[in-house]
Amino acid sequence: MKRRSTILFLLPPDSVRLNALESVLKGETCAERYLFYGLDFFIDNNIHVKHNLTDGFNYSRIIGKFYRLIIRCLGGYAGNLDWLIPVWKFLWQAQAIVAYSDRIMFPLLYMMISKLCPWKPVLYIPIGLPEKICYFSNPFILNKFLYALSRLARIVPLSYPEAKILQEQYGVSGNIKFIPAGVDTKYFYPEMRTPVWDVVSIGADRFRDFFTLFDAARRLKNSRFLVITSKEHASRFQGVPANVQVNTDVPMSEIREYLSLGSVVALPVQDNTYSGGTTVMLQSMAMGKTVVANRIGANVSGYGFVDGKNCLFIPPQNPGTLAEALSFTLLNKEFRSRLGATARDHVVRHLDINIFHRKLFSMVKEICPDLTIPEEKRYSERKKTNFRKEISKTY
């Protein structure tokens, strides 16, 4: 009998993913589902899955520290080798690999280049890869790395500008396929709630522009603002306006409620190739909210965002324009309702998370033609439960 194929998922083993892993493996609806990039979808389609989501081992961290020191001395960008060490044997056994984030893909590429693990069909989902490439100070190492990138089966940026830069500036083109990310429209849905805040802004990535938001808030003294971000971001805030409340390290399970209690969602960002606050933008649109954002990063193209139809785009780092857009939107309830309804319809039709997962699944079947899938399209609920238990025992 032909051995069942195994797909290895490599994801950053942060606390959010580790805490949500059991729920995702059980097939439960949860806010963190989008962080697993189709792992549960593959399981539901009868694919044998392994993953690296574990707290790791002490020796892995020690090896990881030495590895980072060596790569930095060689003039490259390191990433986290310690995230790979616990699943070393699966790098050899898996028929294909789905890898999200540069911090896990970089050490995997170095190992493939050094023949410390075999070349496999890899579907690589980068996030800000051009920004990481800028860390290379050794041209020889960079050229080796770019050549290795070109050998990967698929590179799938979730930002069209990022894909374009990789193609035009770095010559990585034949294996790049942009697809838009998705949102769980069954989890994020419109709720009829009395607003507590006029403007809600959520995000923790390094390109979020809360200082422009604060300047806008000072011009709208009668409006209530809520900012949800990380403690690291908040530690850099100075002179926060009196009408702005800042909450830090809010559990992802509470994000939906905070979004439902805001009239408008504002997501200003600084210029970059991938982050437009797009994840929160999709979640907000799915909830029928009016989103004021910048046409930057992933928001530029490929998601079907249309200014004045399903969102509002304004120039970046312009507090006056942001304040005007927020003021207009807050004063026009009918406009908010119309824009929010159009936004919800757009993401349900084109950007639902299951559409995204199906595209990833199709790509893996393309790059791994020997992938064996049993004739049953899906398990019965009883079989599915047993299979999920098996997957949870990866270690």
Image (spheres, helix red, strand yellow):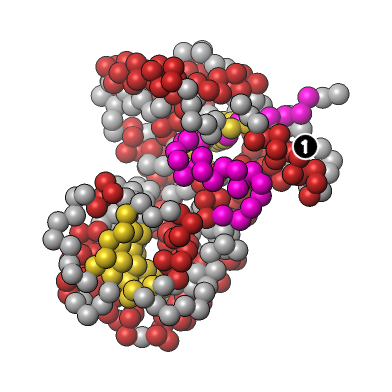
Residue at the limit of the structure toward the left, as seen here: 239
34 left or right of 280 in image: right
Camera-side residue: 146 or 92?
A: 92
* Residue drawn where x is 26% and y is 77% of the image: 223
Q: Is residue 76 magenta?
A: no
* Residue drawn where x is 45% and y is 30% of the image: 104
Up/down of 284 relative to 327, above or below: above
Q: Is residue 368 visible?
A: no
Quarter in which the N terminus is drawn: top right
Residue at the limit of the structure toward the top, as seen here: 115
25 left or right of 152 in image: right
Up/down of 377 relative to 284, above or below: above
* Residue drawn where x is 17% and y is 62% of the image: 240
- Residue 257 percent across, percent down from the top left: 46, 66
Quarter in which the C terminus is drawn: top right
- Residue 388 percent across, percent down from the top left: 70, 40
Q: Quadrant of residue 259?
A: bottom left
Q: Which residues are magenta?
A: 3-30
Up/down of 384 relative to 334, above or below: above
Q: Is residue 14 visible?
A: yes
* Residue drawn where x is 27% and y is 74% of the image: 224
Q: Quadrant of residue 127?
A: top left
- Residue beneath label 1, please? 373
User: Under tag 1, what secondary structure?
Assistant: loop
